[in-house]
Amino acid sequence: MVPARHHPCFDFRLDASMGAGNTFPAFGFHAMRNRKIPNMKLIQTLVVVSLLAVFAASADARNNGNNKKANEQAEKEKAKKEKERAERKKVREAVDAFMTPRDKNKDGSLTKEEFLSGETDKAAGEKKFNEANKNNDRALYKTEIQAMLGL
């Protein structure tokens, strides 16, 4: 056997024991097994941390695609709610604009006399009041006025 040449980290051995009559030398690559590598724990820790960083980055990239879809959906929902809120505000303002000048006692409803105070044609106004007063309680509330105005 030929003496092994040494490397600081690996053993390169020239192995001529291939079998009887075979003179072609075979090179065996053997990692050093009994030597201590300085800072091995540090190297292992750095390898593990770098692998975790790669996995976290790939998962984050996947989640960004999902978050983008979720954010778009949330924006659509938010826009829809804002539109509904604006429509309700418009209806509320229209009902208040109709009620405020007529509601003399400020109780939030219009009696027949309060309703007719803003009408020029009293007979048509009385007919309109009776049609709008669905529950026949002799007063129009905001929901009945809203229905009467077609909002």
Image (cartoon, helix red, strand yellow):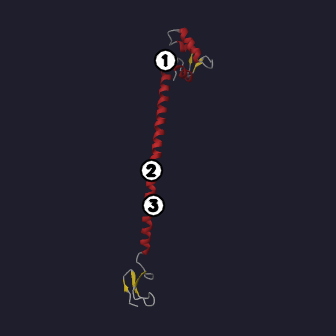
| Mark toward the start of the polypeptide (3 vs 1) | 3
> Which amino acid type corresponds to the residue marked 2 in the rendered image?
Gly
Most foreground residue, 78 or 126: 78
> Which amino acid type corresponds to the residue marked 3 in the rendered image?
Phe
Q: Which residue is mark 1?
A: 101
Most foreground residue, 15 or 85: 15
Q: Position of residue 64 (x, y in %)?
A: 44, 51
> Which amino acid type corresponds to the residue marked 1 in the rendered image?
Pro
Q: Secondary structure at mark 2?
A: helix
Residue at 44%, 73% in the rendered image: 41
Q: Which residue is mark 3?
A: 55
Say few, some or many: other residues with alpha carbon within 10 Å of mark 2 (under 14 / 14 to 19 / 20 or more): few
Whole-angstrom CA distance, mark 3 to mark 1, is 68 Å
Q: Which residue is mark 2?
A: 65
Most foreground residue, 85 or 74: 74
Say few, some or many: other residues with alpha carbon within 10 Å of mark 1 (under 14 / 14 to 19 / 20 or more): few
Whole-angstrom CA distance, mark 3 to mark 2, is 16 Å
Whole-angstrom CA distance, mark 1 to mark 2, is 55 Å
Q: Position of residue 84 (x, y in %)?
A: 49, 32
| Mark toward the start of the polypeptide (1 vs 2) | 2
Residue at 43%, 61% in the rendered image: 54
